[in-house]
Image (tube, grey):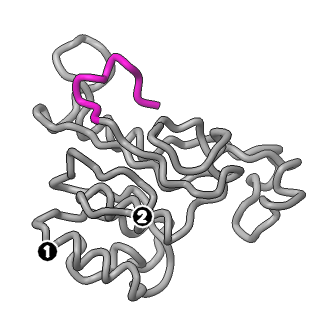
Amino acid sequence: LLRVSQAGKLLDGFDFILNAPFANDGDGRDADASDPGEFVTAGEVAQPPFNIPGCAPAPGSDHVNSSWHGTRVSSLIAGLTNNGEGVAGTGWNTLILPVRVLGKCGGTDSDIIAGMRWAAGISVPGVADNQTPAQIINLSLGGSGACSAAYQQAVNEITARGVLIVASVGNDGQAVAAPANCTGVL
C-alpha cells in the first residue's frame, strides 16, 4: 500500500475494477486507486461470486493473503530516496500513476484494457480523462494464451501515442502470454 508519505511521487490514479465484490473496497470504479488487498477466505470461495476456477486459498490454508504485487513493483521503481527509510527506488525523478485493475480472484481483460487506455491518456467511457498520461505503463500482471484482438487494439492505440508498455513474463515458469505477447509490448 502506498502511503501518504510517498505523495511527492504519487499522482492521482483510478480504480478500474468494475465489479464491487471483486474490488474489495465497497464499490466499483472510482477515483480512489488505493488497494485494500486481494485476500479471499475459504468461506468466501465456497459461495458466489467467488466460487470460480482459480479463486481458492492454497491447500491447507483458510485464506489467501494479499500480495500488493503492483504496489511493491511501484516502490522499486519510484520509492522515495535519501530519506533513511526502506529502499530507494531506481527512478529518482519518476512519478507513479496508480491504476488499479486487479482485485480478489484476479481481474477481467476489460478492466485491464480500460486501465491501460486511461493511463495513456485515451478516453474511457464513464471516466474522467486522465490529466497526467503515463510515458511508460508497467503491467505487473499476466494472463494466459495468445494476445486477443482487444488487447492488440489497445496496445496499438497506446504505442501510437509514444507510450512504452512493459509487461511481466515467465511467471510460474509458463510461456509468455497475454498481454506480454502482444506486438509492441516489452
Label 2 CA crowd tier, 10 Å (few <14, some 14–19, many 20+): few
Foreground of the two, 119 or 172: 119
Q: Residue at x 31, y 23 (%)?
A: 6
| Mark seen at residue 125 | 2
Q: Is residue 92 left or right of residue 75?
A: left
Name the front one of labels 1 and 2.
Answer: 2
Q: Indicate yes or no whether the magenta region holds residue 82.
A: no
Kind of element beneath mark 1: helix
Q: Position of residue 72 (x, y in %)?
A: 40, 39
The residue range painted magenta reads 1-11
Q: Quadrant of residue 56?
A: bottom right
Q: Position of residue 26 (x, y in %)?
A: 67, 40
Q: Quadrant of residue 113?
A: bottom left
Q: Residue at x 45, y 58 (%)?
A: 126
Q: Is residue 122 above or below residue 4?
A: below
Q: Amino acid at mark 2?
A: Pro
Which image quarter is the C terminus in? bottom left
Earlier-in-chain disc, 1 versus 2: 2
| Mark seen at residue 17 | none
Q: Is residue 167 above or below residue 10?
A: below
| Mark seen at residue 160 | 1
Q: Amino acid at mark 1?
A: Ala
Q: Position of residue 15 (x, y in %)?
A: 48, 47
Label 1 CA crowd tier, 10 Å (few <14, some 14–19, many 20+): few
Q: CA distance from mark 1 to mark 2?
A: 20 Å
